[in-house]
Every structure is written in structure tokens, then in C-alpha cells.
């Protein structure tokens, strides 16, 4: 019986459906766990007697395991996994033309199922898209950008001009297209050429670690300030006490005279 190259997928699926670990299956079959791991990795194929034992342990047939023919086991319990491609992370000073040479990037993040194969990521820097209410994109936020989408009113888009990227919200008003910041301290401006928009944002990934570090630093700073204020108050109280004793001593000397 010929064992084809998809044997590794079938044995892995059948083992998961049977709710067995690699070690448990190995014990039932009479082999070591690393042998089961080798089967599932495609690095090894079993002999006929081991194949028969595998089929019996997994509740299927040797033919199905080897060739995928015949009645398959119940695979409804198998958890399907989706492998997402890694996409490069662009920053405001990177050229969009660098995307063609992904070897030049040092940071990558997983894409998302809805993104096209042209998608990439962009790291927001600065506070122009930070808002105290509603949607906010603080500095350090990673957004997934898809160049294959046509930008529409109120989309969040990546704009590229004069060698720099900027992340803004696209707004249409009285016949003009505007790039708007969420931070009211930054002005909106008309976009002259819509071709400068290189992609539409699909998803934002906000790192909570940086905010937690900032919060801890602020707390430590506040604690230090409180400690400093307490120490200063103690010194003032001690000085006032000394001055009071000196004043009492002077009064006593004056009375004696």
C-alpha cells in the first residue's frame, strides 16, 4: 500500500478528532511519541503493521490513512486553523517603494483574513490622531492598510506625499476632499490629488504595554513628588520648632535682665 504525502494531515486530523495527544496515541500504537510527531511533520511514514495499529487506535481504516480512500473518521471535533501571512510594518519616514523589497524591513505583524495580498502595516507616530472621545489612534498604534480598496468618505487612510506618510481621516465636504486629524489641535487640509492616498485602514492594533509603562512612570513620579513634599514639610516643621525654642530662650534671657 502506497502512503501518499497527505498522510501527515490525515493522521493529525484523526488524532485530534479522537481527542488524543501524540503521547497517548504513541502508547496505544506501541511507538515513542517522537515517532508520531515525525509522522505528523511529514518526516516519516509508518510500516504496514504500524499503519494498521494507527488505524485501529484512531477508529479508521489503513486505506483512509494511507491514501484518503474509504470511509473517513468523524472529524467534526478538529479545530481548523488559519495561517495568516506576515506583512511588513511601515513607518512615517519609510518609502512606500520599499514595500517591494520586504527584506529591508525588520518588523512584521500577521495580516487579517479580510486583507488582500497587497496589504501592509503602518505604525502611527505622534498625537495628531489621538482623541479624548470616540475613536482614537494613539502613538504606537499599528494599522493594517489595504491599497486595493477605493477610499470613501470617513475612511481612515494612509496619505503619502513628499517622501512622508501620514494617517488621517478622509472627509468630503462641499465638493472637496479633506484629510482630517482627530486631534483638534491639528488643522484639516484639502487633498489636491487623490492618488496620494495609498491605502485604506482595515484594522487597528493598539499596544497596551506602552500605556501601562507610562502610567507606572506617572505613578512613580507622583509618588516621588508626594514623598518630596512630605520631606519638605517635615523639614519646615523641624525648623519652626527650632525657631520657637530659640525665641523662648531669648524671652527667658530678657526676663532675667
Image (cartoon, rainbow, N blue to C red):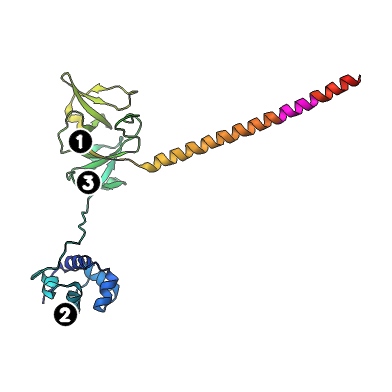
Cβ–Cβ under 8 Å for marks 2 and 1: no
Q: Which mark is residue 112?
A: 3
Indicate the quadrant containing the C terminus: top left, top right, bottom left or bottom right: top right
Residue under label 1, please give it. 199
Q: Residue furthest left?
A: 70
Per the image, label 3 sits on a secondary structure element best described as loop
N-term-proximal mark, 2 vs 3: 2
Per the image, label 2 sits on a secondary structure element best described as helix
Q: Magenta residues, as a range?
A: 238-246
Mark 2 and mark 1: span between their CA atoms? 55 Å
Residue under label 2, please give it. 48
Q: Is residue 136 left or right of residue 50?
A: right
- Residue 42 drawn above or below residue 148: below
> What residue is drawn where x is 27% and y is 22%?
188
- Residue 232 drawn above or below residue 102: above
Mark 2 and mark 3: span between their CA atoms? 42 Å
Q: Is residue 221 left or right of residue 175?
A: right
Q: State whether the magenta stretch is mostly helix, strand or loop.
A: helix
Mark 1: give few (<14), some (14-19) or many (20+) Cα within 10 Å.
many
Q: Residue furthest bottom?
A: 49
Q: Is residue 49 magenta?
A: no
The residue nearer to you, when weighing 110 against 61, is 61
Cβ–Cβ under 8 Å for marks 2 and 3: no
Q: Is residue 9 left or right of residue 168?
A: left
Picture quadrant where residue 57 is located: bottom left
Mark closer to the observer (2, 1): 2
Q: Is residue 109 left or right of residue 220?
A: left
Indicate the quadrant containing the N terminus: top left, top right, bottom left or bottom right: bottom left
Amino acid at each position: 500500500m502506497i502512503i501518499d504525502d497527505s498522510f501527515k494531515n490525515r493522521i493529525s486530523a484523526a488524532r485530534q478528532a479522537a481527542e488524543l495527544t501524540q503521547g497517548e496515541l504513541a502508547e496505544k500504537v506501541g511507538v515513542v511519541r517522537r515517532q508520531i510527531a515525525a509522522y505528523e511533520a511529514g518526516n516519516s511514514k509508518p510500516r504496514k503493521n504500524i499503519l494498521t495499529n494507527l488505524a485501529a487506535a484512531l477508529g479508521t481504516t489503513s486505506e483512509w490513512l494511507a491514501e484518503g480512500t474509504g470511509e473517513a473518521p468523524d472529524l467534526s471535533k478538529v479545530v481548523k486553523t488559519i495561517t495568516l501571512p506576515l506583512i511588513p510594518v511601515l513607518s512615517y519616514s519609510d518609502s512606500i517603494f520599499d514595500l517591494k523589497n520586504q527584506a529591508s524591513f525588520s518588523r512584521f505583524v500577521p495580516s487579517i483574513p479580510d486583507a488582500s495580498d497587497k496589504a501592509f502595516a503602518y505604525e502611527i507616530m505622534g498625537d495628531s490622531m489621538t482623541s479624548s472621545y470616540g475613536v482614537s489612534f494613539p502613538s504606537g498604534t499599528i494599522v493594517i492598510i489595504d491599497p486595493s480598496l477605493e477610499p470613501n468618505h470617513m475612511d481612515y487612510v494612509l496619505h503619502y506625499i513628499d517622501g512622508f506618510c501620514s494617517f488621517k481621516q478622509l472627509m468630503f465636504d462641499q465638493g472637496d476632499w479633506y484629510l482630517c486629524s482627530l486631534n483638534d489641535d491639528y488643522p484639516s487640509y484639502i487633498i489636491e490629488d487623490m492618488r496620494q492616498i495609498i491605502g485604506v485602514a482595515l484594522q487597528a492594533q493598539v499596544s497596551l504595554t506602552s500605556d501601562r509603562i507610562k502610567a507606572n512612570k506617572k505613578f512613580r513620579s507622583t509618588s516621588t513628588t508626594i514623598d518630596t513634599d512630605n520631606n519638605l514639610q517635615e523639614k519646615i516643621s523641624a525648623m519652626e520648632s527650632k525657631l520657637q525654642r530659640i525665641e523662648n530662650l531669648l524671652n527667658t534671657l530678657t526676663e532675667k535682665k
